[in-house]
Structures are given as C-alpha cells and as structure tokens.
Amino acid sequence: MSNRGGLKFWISAWLPVVIGIAVIMLESTEWFGADNTSEPLRKLFESIFGHVTYAKWHVIHAVLRKSGHFLGYGAVGLAWLRAWWMTLPRSRFLQDTILALLGTAIMASADEFHQSFLPNRTSSALDVLLDCCGAVTLQFLVYVYMRTMRPKRLARAA
C-alpha cells in the first residue's frame, strides 16, 4: 500500500481496530453478563459434548469466559499491532508492539471500568491483566512467526 495518505489505506489499517472496539463494547453490556450467557453456552456445549452437571458447568463456563477474554483481547491486540505496523512503516516491531499493548490495555481498563457500573457484571484488575496477557501472547507468536518464516521483512522493520 504505497498511498499512505489515501482514505482507503487508513480504512484498511484501522477498520479492524474499530471493529474490535465495537465488539468489546457490545460484549461489555448487561446482555453478555455471565447470568445471560450461561444457558445458551451450556446448550451449545452439551449439544457437542453431552450433559454436564451444574458444578462442572460452573467451572467450564468460567473457563470459557476467561478464554474469551484472553483470545478476544489477543485478537484485538493483533489488530492494533497491524494498524501501527501499517501506519508507522519506519518504526521497529517492538515500538509497534508497545503501542498495540498500550491500546489494548486502555481498552481493557475502560471495559472493566464500564462494567463496574452494571448490576450483573463485575470489574476486576485481574481481567485487565488477562486481557493484556492475551495480547502479549499473540503478539509474541506473530514475532516468532515473522522471525522464522519471514526474517527479511522483520529485519527491515527492526
């Protein structure tokens, strides 16, 4: 994309970030509280894996929700990384990663702050940490991939 000043470039670079923020905002509502997601997720889970007891489901549901935090914010972190990589072509991978992690941390913090005002949601600094760990992990996997599969491209950016 040589035309960095064009609208098409900016949309291409930043639209995934905007979509990621929109999804996080949607999921940060009362509708996506544990009390509202448990039954639909349980039906789906049991249709695939069979019946589980309430006690087991309670643990499985918690794991599914926390995995969603980790993977969802990991994906949003990759969207931020891609946007910064495209927008700042002369920057180093570490600089883009730090900017992406900062964007992810701000989003995660704002999400938890917002949830503190909702009656059926909880707010936890540990969720922010989990979200950031997802972003760091997926960004690290991208770095490893780039080092092994595309070393010349990463060397140019480094």
Image (cartoon, rainbow, N blue to C red):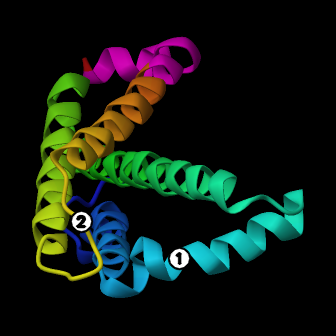
Decide which of 92, 23 is in the foreground and name it: 23
- Name the residue at 15% across, 51% down: 103
Say which element carries label 2.
Answer: loop
Q: Position of residue 71 (x, y in %)?
A: 47, 48
- Amino acid carrying label 1: it is Thr
Residue pointed to by mark 2 = 122
Q: Main secondary structure of the magenta part?
A: helix
Q: Is residue 119 above or below residue 46?
A: below
Asked whether residue 89 is in view, the answer is yes
Of marks 2 and 1, which one's residue comes earlier in the chain?
Answer: 1
**Does the residue at mark 2 contact the one at mark 1 (Cβ under 8 Å)?**
no
- Percent of width and height locating residue 150: 52, 20
Q: How crowded is the residue under tag 2: few (<14 C-alpha within 10 Å), some, or many (20+)? A: some
Left-right relation of 89 to 145: left
What percent of the width, then of the height, locates residue 117? Answer: 11, 78
Q: In this figure, what is the number of numbered marks?
A: 2
Does residue 67 sit above or below 48 in this rendering? above
Q: Quadrant of residue 35 in the image?
A: bottom left
Q: Tell me, yes or no, whether the highlighted magenta stretch contains residue 116.
A: no
Left or right, residue 92 beside residue 33: left
Q: Secondary structure at mark 1?
A: helix
Quadrant housing the N terminus = bottom left
Residue extent of the magenta highlight: 144-157
| Residue at mark 1 | 37
Taking the spot 50% from the left edge, 48% from the top edge, the residue there is: 67
Quadrant where the C terminus sits is: top left
Q: Is residue 104 left or right of residue 147?
A: left
Residue 147 among magenta residues = yes
Query: From the viewer's perspective, is residue 50 above or below residue 82?
Result: below
* Residue 48 placement (x, y as % from top left): 87, 63
